[in-house]
Amino acid sequence: MATPNTVEVPSAAKQKEIFNRLFHRVKEIPEVPEIPREIEQGQVIQGATVQLPQPVTDDQGRVLVKPPAPQQPKITLPLTQDQVQTGLTQKVSDSFRWLAEWCQRLLKKAFLGEGKEKVS
């Protein structure tokens, strides 16, 4: 019998039993997930145009959800093209280099999705 100031520690077997009861549904997840066969053999279609469905309407014909309108964002960079080219030749430890890299990244994100192959 335990005294009021002591704590009984269960045996290793009892600890394992408690652990298994609490976490019996835990499943180990592999680091590299399995790719289903259908996805693995899929084809990638470059430059395909996606047609959005018609607007969603209710029973009375009122529009509930409209397809989003394509947007043409206006990009204003803090550097000119000459400054970006100069910045890309700077040392890696220079912050001007990373500002130029960021500008180039924004341009690539904006224009590579629209069919252009190279942004300089």
Image: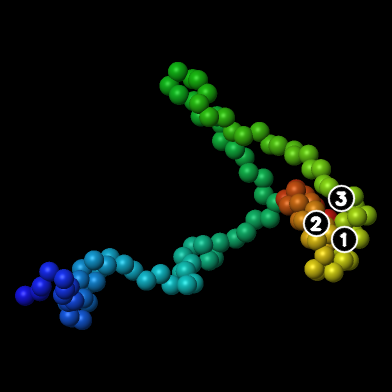
Residue identifier under label 2:
99
Is residue 77 placed above or below 30 in the rendered structure?
above
Examine the rendering and report whether any part of residue 106 can be seen.
yes
Residue 17 % position (x, y): 19, 74
Asked whether disc 2 touches disc 1, contact meaning CB atoms under 8 Å apart, the reply is yes
Is residue 28 placed above or below 11 in the rendered structure?
above
Residue 89 % position (x, y): 89, 66
Residue identifier under label 3:
79
The answer to which of 27 and 43 lies nearer the viewer is 27
Quadrant hosting residue 46: bottom right
Say what amino acid the circle numbered 1 marks: Gly
Please tell me which of labels 2 and 3 falls first in the chain: 3
Examine the rendering and report whether any part of residue 108 can be seen.
no
Residue furthest bottom in the image = 12
Label 2 – label 3 distance at C-alpha: 8 Å
Which of the image's four quarters has the C terminus? bottom right
Label 3 – label 1 distance at C-alpha: 9 Å
User: Who's the residue at 20% across and 81% down the image?
Assistant: 12
Residue 114 % position (x, y): 75, 48
Asked whether disc 2 touches disc 3, contact meaning CB atoms under 8 Å apart, the reply is yes
Determine which of the numbered discs, if any, sits on residue 65 in the image: none
The answer to which of 21 and 112 lies nearer the viewer is 21
SS category of the residue bearing label 2: helix
- 109 left or right of 78? left
Determine which of the numbered discs, if any, sits on residue 87 in the image: 1
Please tell me which of labels 2 and 1 falls first in the chain: 1
User: Who's the residue at 31% across and 67% down the image?
Assistant: 26
